Image (cartoon, rainbow, N blue to C red):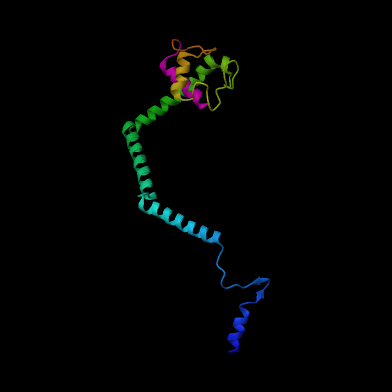
């Protein structure tokens, strides 16, 4: 009996300045936050379980798209001598483009293509675009403010070589 009475007496004592109150419940804000977390968790799980989303499905669609692109590229370019010939042609055009640049373009754009009268061609972006079709158009038609057209002076292959060289800068 004395042991039971001692336990009853301990219920109303202080320990390290904290008073024991067995009938107190957690603060209302904690109850609200806990219930909100439960509701959010159920909604989150419900969305991902029942919406049909799956990382496997996303991976499969990306993989299918890549395979389709590779198949299209394989059909367009047959391996072997075609790609080797194209590689030789591209190397030849780029070399010819460098010589043409020194002859026709260096006077305005500088020998190192860093600019002079004309703009710097080593930048990442050009005013009229830095893709092959845009640079070709600039060379063929010229641009207002000083860029002369080279349509009658250069052949199609020379222009293509010049474009390859400019884009390689």
Give the vertical position of 168 relative to 154 (above or below): below
Say above or below: 58 vs 42: above
Q: Nearer the viewer, residue 39 or 122?
A: 39
Q: Magenta segment range?
A: 153-169
> Extreme top residue here?
152
Q: Position of residue 54 (x, y in %)?
A: 37, 50
Is 45 or 95 nearer to us in this picture?
45
Image coordinates of residue 86 in percent, x first then y, are 39, 27
Q: Residue at x 57, y 17 (%)?
A: 118
Residue located at (32% from left, 31% from top): 76
- Between residues 49 and 57, which one lies in front from this camera angle? 49
In the displayed structure, does residue 24 sit left or right of residue 150?
Answer: right
Residue, far bottom:
1
Q: Residue at x 58, y 85 (%)?
A: 4
The residue at the far right in this view is: 17
The one nearer the camera, 113 or 119, is: 119
Please name the predominant secondary structure of the magenta segment in the image.
helix
Compared to residue 113, the image places residue 79 above or below, namely: below
Q: Is residue 79 visible?
A: no
Asked if one can make out residue 119 in the rendered structure from this viewpoint, the answer is yes
Q: Residue furthest left?
A: 75
Q: Where's residue 107, x and y in %? A: 57, 14
Q: Is 57 left, or right, of 128 in this rendering?
A: left
Q: Position of residue 24 (x, y in %)?
A: 57, 69
- Decide if residue 18 is on the left or right side of residue 74: right
Q: Residue at x 39, y 49 (%)?
A: 55
* Residue 125 is covered by the magenta coloring: no
**Image quarter (top left, top right, bottom left or bottom right) of the N terminus:** bottom right
Instruction: Count the marks.
Output: 0
Q: Is residue 162 magenta?
A: yes
């Amino acid at each position: 009996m004395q042991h039971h009475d001692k336990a009853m007496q301990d219920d109303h004592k202080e320990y390290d300045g904290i008073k024991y109150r067995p009938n107190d419940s957690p603060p209302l804000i904690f109850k609200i936050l806990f219930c909100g977390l439960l509701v959010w968790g159920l909604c989150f799980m419900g969305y991902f379980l029942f919406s049909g989303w799956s990382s496997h499905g996303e991976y499969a669609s990306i993989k299918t798209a890549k395979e389709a692109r590779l198949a299209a590229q394989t059909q367009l370019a047959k391996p072997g001598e075609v790609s080797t010939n194209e590689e030789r042609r591209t190397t030849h055009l780029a070399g010819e483009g460098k010589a043409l640049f020194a002859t026709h373009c260096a006077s305005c754009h500088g020998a190192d293509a860093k600019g002079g009268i004309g703009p710097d061609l080593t930048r990442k972006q050009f005013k009229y675009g830095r893709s092959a079709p845009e640079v070709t158009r600039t060379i063929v038609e010229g641009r207002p403010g000083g860029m002369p057209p080279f349509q009658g002076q250069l052949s199609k292959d020379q222009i293509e070589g010049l474009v390859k060289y400019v884009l390689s800068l």
